[in-house]
Image (spheres, grey):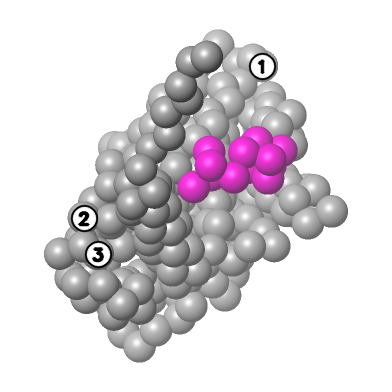
């Protein structure tokens, strides 16, 4: 009769404790839009700062959280992949909407997500209706608050004293338009998505070299964002 080996109870307990700390830290950071510092996480978990730093570093390595320029940790784009049922459904819902809008407008349209202090392209759709257009790849990123997508995502945060006026203006109007902020000669039009989970910040973003397309695209972009948002809330 073969002997079945099992891990020592102490090892199993240590592993469970480490996992629990990691999940608790992820939950804390993801549920705090303004982000958390290492000491804040340590205090809330009731552990030493060194342990909290180790847990946060591991979560950041897997892109579940990210460290912003202010030293605080915020939810990372990896949480979208982790929440596969919700996020995959949202992406699948968004893609046909983006394709229709891209072909109608003759411009590249993308789904952009916030990761730390950056705006990251998670889906990019190029138009099939025109031969020439601007584009960029999935994974492209630029700073939050810069460019149409960066401004749209920044507007999804609660207002604060001293925030840049362009962000406040996007929050008031519901859309962002820019020229040449990310790429020289490129116009951007972005609309933030209104989703059930306020911690999930995404927007739809159009990029074009044609001023006339940028100026006439707003109505269609607003409709696309509304359609995606309503589908996500259903």
Label the magenta part by its dominant secondary structure. helix
- For marks 1 and 3, the one nearer the N-term is 3
- Residue 79 shows in the view: yes
How far across and how far down the image is residue 223, in percent?
Answer: 75, 49
On residue 54, the disc is 2
Residue at x-position 39% and y-position 84%: 160
**Magenta-colored span:** 79-91
Where disc 2 sits, the SS reads helix
Residue at x-position 75% and y-position 51%: 232
Left or right: where does residue 195 sit relative to residue 22?
A: right
Where disc 3 sits, the SS reads helix
Q: Which residue is mark 1?
A: 129
Mark 1 to mark 2: distance in Å? 50 Å
- Residue 94 shows in the view: no
Q: Which residue is mark 3?
A: 52
Residue at x-position 65% and y-position 36%: 88
Left or right: where does residue 99 sit relative to residue 142?
A: right
Q: Residues within 10 Å of mark 1 (few under 14, many from 20)?
A: few
């Amino acid at each position: 009769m073969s002997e079945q080996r099992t891990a020592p109870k102490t090892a199993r307990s240590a592993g469970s404790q480490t996992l629990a700390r990691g999940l608790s830290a992820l939950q804390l950071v993801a549920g705090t839009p303004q982000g958390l510092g290492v000491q804040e996480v340590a205090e809330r978990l009731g552990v030493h700062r060194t342990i909290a730093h180790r847990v946060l570093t591991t979560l950041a390595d897997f892109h579940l959280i990210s460290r912003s320029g202010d030293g605080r940790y915020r939810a990372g784009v990896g949480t979208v992949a982790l929440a596969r049922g919700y996020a995959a459904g949202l992406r699948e819902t968004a893609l046909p909407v983006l394709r229709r809008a891209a072909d109608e407008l003759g411009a590249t349209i993308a789904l952009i997500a916030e990761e730390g202090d950056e705006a990251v392209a998670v889906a990019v759709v190029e138009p099939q209706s025109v031969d020439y257009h601007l584009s960029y790849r999935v994974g492209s990123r630029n700073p939050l608050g810069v460019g149409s997508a960066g401004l749209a995502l920044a507007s999804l945060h609660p207002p604060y004293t001293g925030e840049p006026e362009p962000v406040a203006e996007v929050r008031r109007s519901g859309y962002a338009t820019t020229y040449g902020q990310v790429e020289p000669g490129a116009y951007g039009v972005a609309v933030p998505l209104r989703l059930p989970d306020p911690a999930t910040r995404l927007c739809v973003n159009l990029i074009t070299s044609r001023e006339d397309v940028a100026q006439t695209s707003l109505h269609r972009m607003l409709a696309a964002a509304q359609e995606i948002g309503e589908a996500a809330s259903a």
